[in-house]
Amino acid sequence: MLDPPGVDDAHGDTMDAGALRLPEGVNEVPLYWVHSYHVGIVPDASPEQRLPVGSATVWEEEGQWYFVPCFNLLTDLSQKVKGAVDAGDIAACSIGYRTVRATPNGKGPDGKGEDVHEARLLEVSLVDVGAKAGAVRIKMADEPKKPEEKKPEPPAVDMADLYTMVKAIHAKMFPPESEAKPPESEGKATEPPATKDDKPQTDVPQDESASENEAPPSTEDEDPVTKWLRSLAA
């Protein structure tokens, strides 16, 4: 609400530290739009515009003055000012006070600036451009929160389909030795497939130990795909 002590505002006024005061037991003052109650500042204001647009809860903290606006929404002006504040279009304020003690300093556009030593706060006004550079909004009380971005959920996986797909890829990349075919030489005729009566052409002994009544293999004998899927489910 105020500039630091000794800093001139647009009117050439300065205010000592601790100069601004409130009446005993008072922490609320009227809230206006650009001091519209003051005939000297806004001579053409309508009776409705001279009404407060709300109230301001004021307090001092560590030498700084703050206020929170509360709009009454009783007039069209109050509703419009609140809408502009909520939209972030209004961020400055000004104060109306009665000077108790001051010393002329000859500053300002008209040379009537004062060094204020004691003053009584009368009202707070929201303005488009304030006379005091430090009288600006520092926080938006009802600032809307950005919606949290929802991360897309991974699609549901059918374990049977996944097993079939991974097993097919594994078989394609690592075919069993019995199915591996050596590259055919060019110019050689392809031999006809062996029949049931043909004798085996290789010396590799066939495994005749497997039978239909054999117990299911243990996990140590599982193929790599089954082991990998089992580790995912563990």
Image (tube, rainbow, N blue to C red):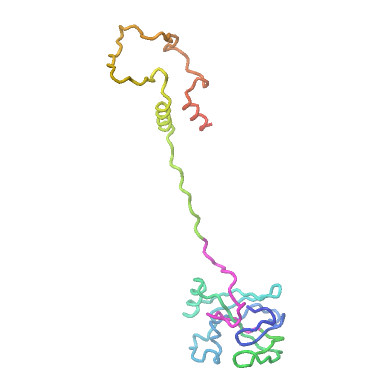
From this view, report whether residue 207 is shown above or below residue 163.
Answer: above
Position of 109 with respect to 45 (left or right) is right
Residue drawn at 39 percent across, 20 percent down: 180
From this view, report whether residue 33 is shown above or below residue 228.
Answer: below
Quarter that holds the C terminus? top right
Position of 190 with respect to 130 (left or right) is left
Q: Which residues are magenta?
A: 121-145
Q: Nearer the viewer, residue 199 or 217?
A: 199
Quarter that holds the N terminus? bottom right
Q: Nearer the viewer, residue 114 or 188?
A: 188
Residue 110, quarter of the rendered image = bottom right
Q: How many numbered circles are shown?
A: 0
Residue 112, quarter of the rendered image = bottom right
Residue 225 percent across, percent down from the top left: 46, 27
Residue drawn at 50 percent across, 29 percent down: 230
Report if residue 150 lies within the magenta region: no
Which SS type dominates the magenta stretch? loop
Residue 199 percent across, percent down from the top left: 34, 6
Residue 226 percent across, percent down from the top left: 47, 26
Residue 59 percent across, percent down from the top left: 66, 75
Residue drawn at 52 percent across, 22 percent down: 219
Residue drawn at 28 percent across, 19 percent down: 187
